[in-house]
């Protein structure tokens, strides 16, 4: 009976050891599962935070893009204005240079005493016409239009 008692006791101890090993394995697997769940939850919260931060940064970038677009638009407008003003200045410079050249050509030296004598454009146009030059050539030499030359000639013919 002693043997039977020891055998039963050994079986109970064996079942107890198996039970303890299985309980630990189950706890470990549940422990791994809980760790995995915790990691998943942490990753999800990090992703939510990252998405929120990214949206904020995208909003800031879009604001900067809008402000830069406005600045570029204003710069383009100012560049166009500057181009127009430069063109106006170039045109006016050409006109003033032409006037200066015409004024220089309207002054001649008197051959007798070398005094400067100013001849107006009408007299010069008539003089060139009387010398046989065409209206086109006179207009080119004096820097005036053909219509102005024809008008000067027709007015002189009326007198």
Image (spheres, rainbow, N blue to C red):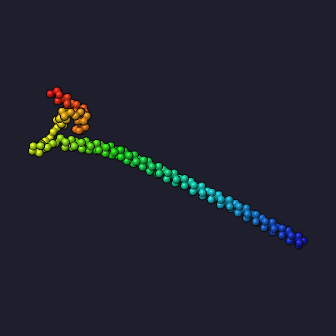
Q: Residue furthest right?
A: 1
Quarter of the rendering occupied by the N terminus = bottom right
Q: Residue furthest front?
A: 132
Which of the 4 image quadrants contains residue 103?
A: top left
Q: Residue furthest bottom?
A: 2
- Residue 4 position, x and y percent, is 88, 70
User: In the image, what residue occupies the spot 62% across and 59% down?
Assistant: 39
Report the front residue among 159 and 86. 159
- Residue 54 position, x and y percent, is 52, 53
Q: Is residue 85 visible?
A: no
Count the numbered circles shown: 0
Which of the 4 image quadrants contains residue 17?
A: bottom right
- Residue 32 position, x and y percent, is 68, 61
Report the front residue among 122 and 89. 122
Quarter of the rendering occupied by the C terminus = top left
User: In the image, what residue occupies the spot 39% across and 48% down?
Assistant: 71
> Is residue 116 depicted above or below 156 in this figure?
below
Judged left or right of residue 60, residue 46 is right
Q: Is residue 140 visible?
A: yes
> Is residue 157 depicted above or below 41 in this figure?
above
User: In the image, what residue occupies the spot 85% across and 68% down?
Assistant: 8
> Is residue 50 depicted above or below 107 in this figure?
below
């Amino acid at each position: 009976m002693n043997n039977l008692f020891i055998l039963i006791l050994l079986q109970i101890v064996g079942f107890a050891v198996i039970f303890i090993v299985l309980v630990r394995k189950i706890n470990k697997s549940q422990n791994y599962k809980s760790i995995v769940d915790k990691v998943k939850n942490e990753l999800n919260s990090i992703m939510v935070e990252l998405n929120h931060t990214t949206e904020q940064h995208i909003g800031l970038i879009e604001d900067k893009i809008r402000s830069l677009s406005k600045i570029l638009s204003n710069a383009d407008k100012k560049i166009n204005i500057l181009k127009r003003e430069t063109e106006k200045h170039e045109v006016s410079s050409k006109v003033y240079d032409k006037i200066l050249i015409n004024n220089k050509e309207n002054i001649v030296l008197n051959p007798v005493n070398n005094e400067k004598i100013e001849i107006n454009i009408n007299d010069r146009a008539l003089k060139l016409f009387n010398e046989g030059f065409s209206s086109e050539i006179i207009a080119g030499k004096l820097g005036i239009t053909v219509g102005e030359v024809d008008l000067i000639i027709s007015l002189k013919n009326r007198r």
